[in-house]
Amino acid sequence: MNLDKIISLALEEDSALNDITSKNIISKDTVASAVLMAKHSGIICGIDVFKQVFLKLDKNFHFEIFKNDGQKVKNGDIILKMKGPAYYLLCGERTALNFIQALSGIATTTNIFANIVKNTNTCIYDTRKTMPGLRHISKYAVRCGGGKNHRMSLADMVLIKDNHLKLITNLVKKVEEIRKKHKNILIQVECETKKHVLDALKAKVDLIMLDNMKKEQVKKMIKLIRQNSTQTYKPEIEISGGVNLNTIKEYAKLGIDRISIGMLTHSAPSLDISLKIKVPK
């Protein structure tokens, strides 16, 4: 979705142009300065979105940027300074903060996971578990945190999940049919059992996802996949489901290519950031 449209919808939701409080307190001629400050350590993401919220309300805002997307911050760091109409500053404050806090939270959570596996061959991937309409900026936040994006939409790759498998009688034949129609598209199969893995190997899919398997089962399936790999066919191995900060390091040591984590985008805690008006002395 277009970022300008997302911002417009967010401002409309908040009735930013009908702020009863600010209308009755602040003259529209009043100019104010403010600082955006980190109140917790993390990774910043969403500077441009933050700016665009205010510029959508009034073009007379000016910004001085001290921290860019993807950079680390700690408690007390100034992210940016801004100056503009005080009335619109207050009208857009919460909307702008909601964006940058949420996106920075995604980037920060992703970065924690990415740092744990950085000395391995495993990469951290997101999923499509995002708030509807906010997928593009959420996945951008994942990249800012050092993660990678799984498919952006259903059209990007073939991902045969458990519910698809229940409706397929012959996976090999089905994959052959798909490859004839879509020459250059990746095909992945979500596997919950050994049979699923064997069928996926026989179909020579590009990626095999080991979904919600216990660690010992994951080890066995990795061994099985590698034993059936050749110089010309070596599928990437991804695990998904049940991975957390306490278990991810051990999984990464198993030599897998990808770990996909839904919580990066569906339940990352927002980063604490505040916007404070500076009153001239």
Image (cartoon, rainbow, N blue to C red):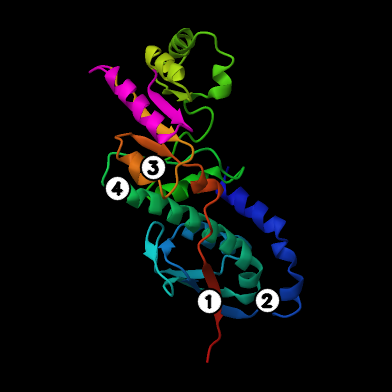
| Dot placed on the residue nearer the N-terminal end, 1 or 4 | 1
> CA–CA distance between discs 3 and 4?
9 Å
| Dot placed on the residue nearer the N-terminal end, 2 or 4 | 2
Give me the residue at 33% from left, 40% from top: 252
For disc 3, the marked residue is: 124
Q: Is residue 32 left or right of residue 221?
A: right
> CA–CA distance between discs 2 and 3?
47 Å
Give me the residue at 49% from left, 57% from top: 105
For disc 2, the marked residue is: 28
> CA–CA distance between discs 2 and 4?
50 Å
Q: Residue furthest front?
A: 216
Residue 100: mark? none
Q: Are marks 2 and 3 in contact (CB under 8 Å)?
A: no
Q: Helix, strand, or loop for circle 4?
A: loop
For disc 4, the marked residue is: 118
Q: Is residue 125 left or right of residue 273?
A: left
Instruction: Say few, some or many: other residues with alpha carbon within 10 Å of mark 1 (under 14 / 14 to 19 / 20 or more).
Output: some
> CA–CA distance between discs 3 and 1?
36 Å
| Dot placed on the residue nearer the N-terminal end, 3 or 4 | 4
- Asked whether the viewer can see residue 137, the reply is no
Q: Residue 58's quadrant in the figure?
A: bottom right
Instruction: Say few, some or many: other residues with alpha carbon within 10 Å of mark 2 (under 14 / 14 to 19 / 20 or more).
Output: few
Magenta stretch: residue 42 in it?
no
The residue stretch that appears in magenta: 205-232
Q: Residue 213 at x, y = what percent?
A: 45, 31
Magenta stretch: residue 212 in it?
yes
Mark 3: which amino acid? Ile
Q: Is residue 225 left or right of residue 271?
A: left
